[in-house]
Image (cartoon, grey):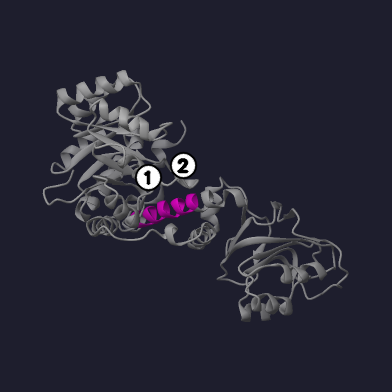
């Protein structure tokens, strides 16, 4: 399946809940080279069939896809979407065969195409074969947002399904410019992109970039080059601690821990230290234990005695340690600021203690009121410090990047003249 120029089709998912925002986004997408406009499920749930009618009237030259995610009453829901102006209607592969068969009949009757979404199918490859036998028009290889956040690879699934069926394939789920090129190479006829276009500040430019990538069929995806830890580090470096806090549902923030100078960015895995008031031996010994790029995280307790200062910072910097977070005090901050070694602490005092050697390295500690285990991810910036459990780091890094993308788009709409409450349509959605 291709357009008149022989190109694969670019479908943009308008997964917003405000119709005026959807129309504005659609205008920029069409200008950037999008072929199909999808009335996303959130938009349909918010605005109903009116959303499809509005997009059809506003963009008569583009095909409108109704992402209905039908599970039952297939015929009537296809009819509703078709009569509202949709050219393609989606149904879930998890629906019963009887529902899908009736939806196929309705699609033929009203002259629209039926796209079946394989998201959450227990055996997507086998289900794709079954759906092909039922005569559907498109199969959509789709990895849902929550699955993406945990590392499920859309393109691996696409490759498996493409080898099993001849039905035209669409692909959706975290598709960016690099993945779009690879999806075309793997045989996808329709490339579906959502947030990587609609959540950017420059929607038209992002659409053009993905369109160009599809046409060139080249690019190597970042996570094909980077290790998992490198990818996590790169993602956390691109976002702020407020983004990460939002992704964690306001969890993980260390209380009372602040940077000793502005402009700090700290990302790395934790090497933990439990020490006692006035004893700086174990904190300094952690410098010998920590590997390059790791973060020392210490509970020191005392507010009048500092277990960390300039010399420890120089030692750490020479070894490539990313920084230190102390639930306690630091000193020599004038020198630390000059060398710009990332230090976060609760207090700043001039007093040092004595090296007595009490405490432990790489044990579970509490720092800033948060549990920290060896290997957890520590992210710090001018806003403070957040700890992310190691086993959830990839998911949270991905979710934080989605938060960042959404804020980029909101920021752009504010710059164009809307207030924040207008962008978010707060008055409509507040509890009554």
Q: Residue 118: x and y, percent?
A: 36, 34
Residue neighbourhood size for the residue with mark 1, other residues' Cα within 10 Å, grouped as few (<14), some (14–19), many (≥20): many
Whether residues under marks 1 and 2 lie with C-beta atoms below 8 angstroms apart, the answer is yes
> What secondary structure is the magenta-colored segment mainly?
helix
Going from N to C along the chain, the mark reached first, 1 or 2, is 2
At x 66% / y 55%, what residue is drawn? 254
* Residue 147: numbered disc: 2
User: Which residue carries the number 1 mark?
Assistant: 173
At numbered mark 1, what does the secondary structure look like: helix, strand or loop?
loop
- Residue lying furthest front: 163
Residue 142 is left or right of residue 268, and the answer is left
Q: Quadrant of residue 349?
A: bottom right
At x 57% / y 69%, what residue is drawn? 264
In this rendering, is residue 359 above or below 184?
Answer: below
Q: Residue 147: x and y, percent?
A: 46, 42
- Toward the viewer: 405 or 284? 284
**Residue 118 counted in the magenta span:** no
At numbered mark 2, what does the secondary structure look like: helix, strand or loop?
helix
Residue 82 is left or right of residue 42, and the answer is left
- Residue lying furthest right: 356
Residues shaded magenta = 398-413
Quadrant where the N terminus sits is top left
Residue 3 is left or right of residue 317, and the answer is left
Residue 17: in sight, yes or no?
no
């Amino acid at each position: 399946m291709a357009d008149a120029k022989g190109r694969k089709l670019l479908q943009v998912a308008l997964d917003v809940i405000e119709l005026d925002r959807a129309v504005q986004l659609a205008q920029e997408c069409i200008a950037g080279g999008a072929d199909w406009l999808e009335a996303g499920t959130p938009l349909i749930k918010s605005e109903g069939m009116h959303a499809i009618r509005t997009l059809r009237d506003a963009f008569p030259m583009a095909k409108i896809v109704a992402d209905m995610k039908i599970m039952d009453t297939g015929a009537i829901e296809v009819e509703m979407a078709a009569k509202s102006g949709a050219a393609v209607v989606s149904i879930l592969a998890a629906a019963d065969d009887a529902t899908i068969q009736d939806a196929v009949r309705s699609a033929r009757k009203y002259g629209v195409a039926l796209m079946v979404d394989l998201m959450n199918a227990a055996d997507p490859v086998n289900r794709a074969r079954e759906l092909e036998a039922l005569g559907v028009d498109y199969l959509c290889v789709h990895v849902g947002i929550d699955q993406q956040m945990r590392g499920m690879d859309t393109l691996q699934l696409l490759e498996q399904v493409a080898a099993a069926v001849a039905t035209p394939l669409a692909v959706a789920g975290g598709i960016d410019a690099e993945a779009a090129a690879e999806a075309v190479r793997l045989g996808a006829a329709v490339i579906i992109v959502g947030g990587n276009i609609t959540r950017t500040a420059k929607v038209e430019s992002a659409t053009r970039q993905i369109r160009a990538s599809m046409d060139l069929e080249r690019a190597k995806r970042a996570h094909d080059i980077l290790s998992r830890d490198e990818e996590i580090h790169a993602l956390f470096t691109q976002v702020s601690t407020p983004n990460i806090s939002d992704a964690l549902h306001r969890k993980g923030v260390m209380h009372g821990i602040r940077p000793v100078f502005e402009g700090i960015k700290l990302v790395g895995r934790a090497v933990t230290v439990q020490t006692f008031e006035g004893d700086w031996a174990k904190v300094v010994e952690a410098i010998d234990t920590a590997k390059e790029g790791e973060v020392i995280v210490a509970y020191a307790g005392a507010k009048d005695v500092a277990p960390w200062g300039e010399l420890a910072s120089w030692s750490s910097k020479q070894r490539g340690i990313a920084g230190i977070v102390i639930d306690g005090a630091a000193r020599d901050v004038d020198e630390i600021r000059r060398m710009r070694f990332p230090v976060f602490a609760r207090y700043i005092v001039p007093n040092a203690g004595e090296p007595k050697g009490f405490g432990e390295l790489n044990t579970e500690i509490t720092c800033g009121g948060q549990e920290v285990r060896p290997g957890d991810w520590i992210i710090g910036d001018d806003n403070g410090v957040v700890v992310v459990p190691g086993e959830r780091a990839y998911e949270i890094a991905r979710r934080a990047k989605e938060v960042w993308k959404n804020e980029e788009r909101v920021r752009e709409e504010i710059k164009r003249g809307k207030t924040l409450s207008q962008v978010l349509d707060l008055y409509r959605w507040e509890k009554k």
